[in-house]
């Protein structure tokens, strides 16, 4: 009865979200003049620096603990190590040339130039496009954290079975070949951005690219040894819950920080983020409760992350009721995507595809429905505000990013396999990554 009651409340919220397209709440403007003034604002700079630290906390320790708790005890150190080393590796790639490829002067709408290699020309002065009130270097640092967490998300799909040397090569190649071009297409002046595609904080750049790449990884590497027969339940759900809390906490920097200032738009994105995360947690719980008979702690944690991921592309373009509607769909659609994983026959160890891939796709499309220029004058109206073309543009972005990520990731995996080998031996997999790859134990 409790599940059905909460479900009824959530369905009411969904109806309210759909109806909010004509409500006064969603038509209240929260942004001021769009004219850029190239002057450092200390409040804006402080907020973006803090947001950068919040996104860092999403990777270490947030994602590391979230994933670490979900694997078996013999693989926790190896799993945490993957997030830590990807953060370190991608940070240096970004500083040397990754940032220039993603945000440097546009070359044909496809990639950025090499003008800013080694951060040459990226200093303390503001950039007219990338934050007119914050130092250019601060914007670079904020984007570095996005570049680092995205390949780290993919590791959940091949948890417990990839060689550490293969991980290093894969993460380096993927961040350059996939992430940098996609970021440029949408945020760096590339063809999708010029088309008018809306992705406030990374629904396509982060979640679709990582989610579909995770699917390719799961298929190419194959299932874990003993998948479907051995006991593979999470070994430490308290770790996963702690990671969930840190992810939720950091997500405010991820989404609200993308306003690039301490302003009304940041507050609006902050509220939308929290509303969708809370809704996703409740709706996943109710859906699981009705489907399986009992609510689970892991379900609530997964639902929260699904809601947060799904609202990411629209956080700066929608009001709170629309964000709740997005959270409802996230809780239901991502739950069933995870349930149907077994029927599809692939082993996505930690449900990256079902949560980030499905959530990213739906979130990008939902932006084409719920976006409102009354919330963000620099954006566009969506279908529910009379602009059907925006939904079409969002759909083009979904297809383009997904197709590019699938093909590129498959090619990268083939190169890595030919170079160092992708998968650990059956013996090493049975022993666990902690001992076989790092000669360490997490527990005595």
Image: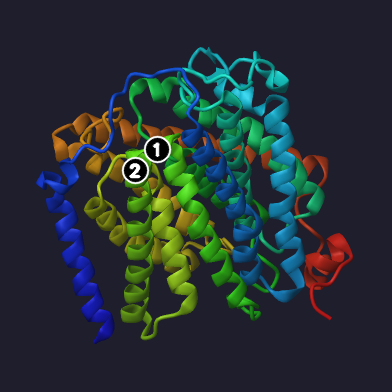
Q: Write down the residue under mark 1.
A: 200
Residue at image location 56% in from the left, 27% down from the top? 181
Residue 395 image offset from top left, x and y in percent: 33, 36
Residue placed under numbered mark 2 in the picture:
314
Dot 1: within a 10 Å radius of its alpha carbon, few (fewer than 14), some, or many (20 or more) residues?
Answer: many
Q: Is residue 303 left or right of residue 225?
A: left
Please say whether residue 413 is visible from this viewpoint: yes
- Tag 1–tag 2 contact (CB < 8 Å): yes
Looking at the image, is 428 positioned above or below residue 105?
Answer: below
SS at mark 2 in the image = helix
In depth, the one of 407 and 358 nearer the eye is: 358
Mark 1 lies on a secondary structure that is: loop
In the rendered image, the quadrant that contains the C terminus is: bottom right
**Residue 114 in picture, x, y percent from top left:** 66, 15
Query: Can the viewer see residue 219 in this picture?
Result: no
Alpha carbon distance from label 1 to label 2: 6 Å
- The picture places residue 74, in percent across and down from the top left corner, at 76, 73
Q: Nearer the viewer, residue 253 or 157?
A: 253
Question: How many C-alpha atoms fall within 10 Å of the one at disc 2: few (<14), some, or many (≥20)?
Answer: many
Q: Residue at x 41, y 66 (%)?
A: 303
Kindly identify the residue that appears in the image at 77 percent across and 47 percent down: 166
């Amino acid at each position: 009865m409790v599940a059905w009651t909460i479900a009824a409340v959530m369905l009411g919220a969904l109806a309210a979200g759909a109806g909010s397209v004509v409500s006064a709440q969603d038509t209240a403007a929260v942004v001021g003049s769009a004219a850029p003034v190239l002057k450092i604002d200390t409040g804006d700079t402080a907020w973006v620096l803090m947001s950068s630290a919040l996104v860092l906390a999403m990777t270490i320790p947030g994602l590391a603990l979230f994933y670490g708790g979900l694997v078996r005890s013999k693989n926790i150190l190896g799993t945490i190590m993957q997030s830590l080393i990807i953060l370190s590796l991608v940070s240096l790639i970004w500083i040397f040339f990754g940032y220039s490829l993603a945000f440097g002067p546009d070359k044909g709408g496809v990639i950025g130039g090499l003008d800013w290699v080694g951060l040459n020309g990226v200093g303390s002065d503001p950039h007219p496009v990338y934050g007119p009130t914050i130092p250019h270097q601060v914007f670079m640092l904020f984007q570095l954290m996005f570049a680092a967490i995205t390949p780290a998300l993919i590791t959940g799909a091949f948890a417990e079975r990839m060689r550490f040397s293969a991980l290093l090569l894969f993460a380096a190649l993927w961040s350059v070949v996939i992430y940098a071009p996609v970021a440029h297409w949408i945020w760096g002046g590339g063809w999708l951005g010029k088309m008018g595609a809306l992705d406030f904080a990374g629904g396509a750049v982060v979640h679709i690219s990582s989610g579909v790449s995770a699917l390719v990884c799961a298929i190419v590497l194959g299932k874990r040894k003993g998948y479907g027969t051995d006991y593979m339940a999470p070994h430490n759900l308290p770790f996963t819950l702690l990671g969930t809390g840190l992810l939720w906490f950091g997500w405010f920097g991820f989404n609200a920080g993308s306003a690039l200032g301490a302003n009304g738009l940041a507050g609006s994105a902050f509220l939308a983020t929290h509303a969708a995360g809370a809704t996703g947690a409740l709706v996943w719980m109710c859906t699981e409760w009705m489907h399986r008979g009992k609510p689970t702690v892991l379900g609530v944690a997964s639902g929260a992350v699904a809601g947060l991921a799904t609202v990411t592309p629209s956080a700066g373009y929608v009001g709170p009721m629309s964000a709740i509607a997005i959270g409802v769909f996230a809780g239901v659609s991502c739950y069933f995507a995870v349930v149907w994983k077994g029927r599809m026959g692939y082993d996505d160890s930690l449900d990256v595809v079902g949560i980030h891939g499905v959530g990213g796709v739906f979130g990008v499309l939902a932006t084409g429905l719920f976006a409102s220029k009354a919330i963000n004058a620099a954006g566009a109206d969506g279908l529910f505000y009379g602009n059907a073309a925006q939904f079409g543009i969002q759909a083009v972005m979904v297809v383009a990013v997904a197709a590019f990520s699938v093909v590129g990731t498959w090619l990268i995996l083939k190169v890595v396999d030919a170079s160092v080998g992708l998968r650990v031996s059956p013996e090493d997999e049975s022993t666990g990554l902690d001992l076989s790859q790092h000669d360490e134990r997490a527990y005595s």
